Amino acid sequence: MQGVNFGTLLIVFAIILVSMMLHELAHGFVAYLLGDDTAKTEGRLTLNPLKHLDPILSVIMPLLLFISGGPIFGGAKPVPVDSRNLRYGVWGMALVAIAGPLTNFLIAFVAFMVGMLTGVTVFDGGALMYYVGDFWGLLLVNIVYVNLGFGVFNLIPIPPLDGSRILYALAPDQVRQVMEGMERWGILLVMILVVVGTSLIGGIMQGAMSGILEGFDWVARLFGR
């Protein structure tokens, strides 16, 4: 693959903004379908990425991870949701939460399939690669990895990440009480985890992303790529 240059950084930055925006938009849209219009009222059902931007989690952290060569992950400003308005109680909140990562995985899957079926990307040794100098290959590979990183990272079960909402729906009352107590410190815990455990998180995420890519490749083989 090509080395990191300013043009590549701009491409990755644009992918991060769009991917993060669609992730948050999915949360708000599912919440709206389930009866809560808080996100719509506050102007968060929008394609304007600036409305969803968190300068650190959405831009600085993922770009630094990209430059360092690690898995790209991050987050955005959470879409406001009033769980009291949602149908299905905690399960409604879980559906809202999982909509974001599923959107990222869907984007990654589509980009993977386009790259493999058109021949501009190659999957080998558990990694998706492109030919040096091929803009479309560069674009598709980074769309895949950015979205896989956002999807997997946000499934970590620490408030306010999406995985915590899913775990909350499944957990017994005692665990829910602990999670409610963590809520006010959640973003700080996430930042500490990122700073202290970047290598550990990166290793776990890399394994998860490789497994997902293997699944994507299996589907691509069904289409005779």
Image (spheres, helix red, strand yellow):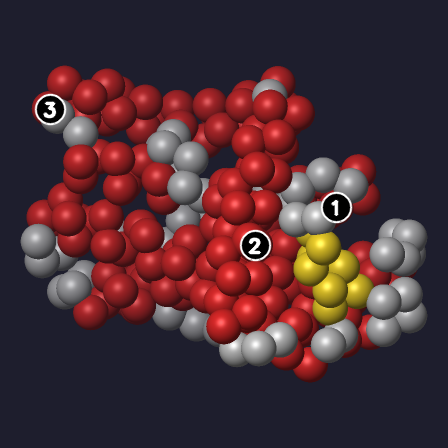
Residue placed under numbered mark 2 in the picture = 213
Label 1 – label 2 distance at C-alpha: 18 Å
Where is residue 97? Give x, y as percent: 31, 50
Residue 74 occupies quadrant = top right
In this view, 121 is above or below 68:
below
Which mark identifies residue 173? 3
Q: Quadrant of the N terminus?
A: bottom right
Q: Amino acid at mark 2?
A: Leu
Measuring 72% from the left and 39% from the top, which residue is drawn there? 70
Instruction: Name the residue nearer the viewer: 179 or 153.
Output: 153
Q: Is residue 44 left or right of residue 37?
A: right
Q: Is residue 88 left or right of residue 176?
A: left
Residue placed under numbered mark 1 in the picture = 66
Q: Is residue 40 left or right of residue 141?
A: left
Where is residue 23? Give x, y as percent: 45, 60
Marks 3 and 2: which is nearer the front?
2
Instruction: Name the residue nearer the viewer: 220 or 32.
Output: 220
Where is residue 28? Give x, y as percent: 32, 62
Mark 1 and mark 3 in contact? Answer it, CB < 8 Å. Answer: no
Q: Amino acid at mark 3?
A: Asp
Measuring 71% from the left and 48% from the top, which residue is drawn there? 125
In this view, 40 is above or below 55:
below
Instruction: Name the residue nearer the viewer: 178 or 115.
Output: 115
Label 1 – label 3 distance at C-alpha: 39 Å
Q: Quadrant of the C terminus?
A: bottom right
Mark 1 and mark 2 in contact? Answer it, CB < 8 Å. Answer: no
- Local SS, label 1: helix
Residue 192 occupies quadrant = top right
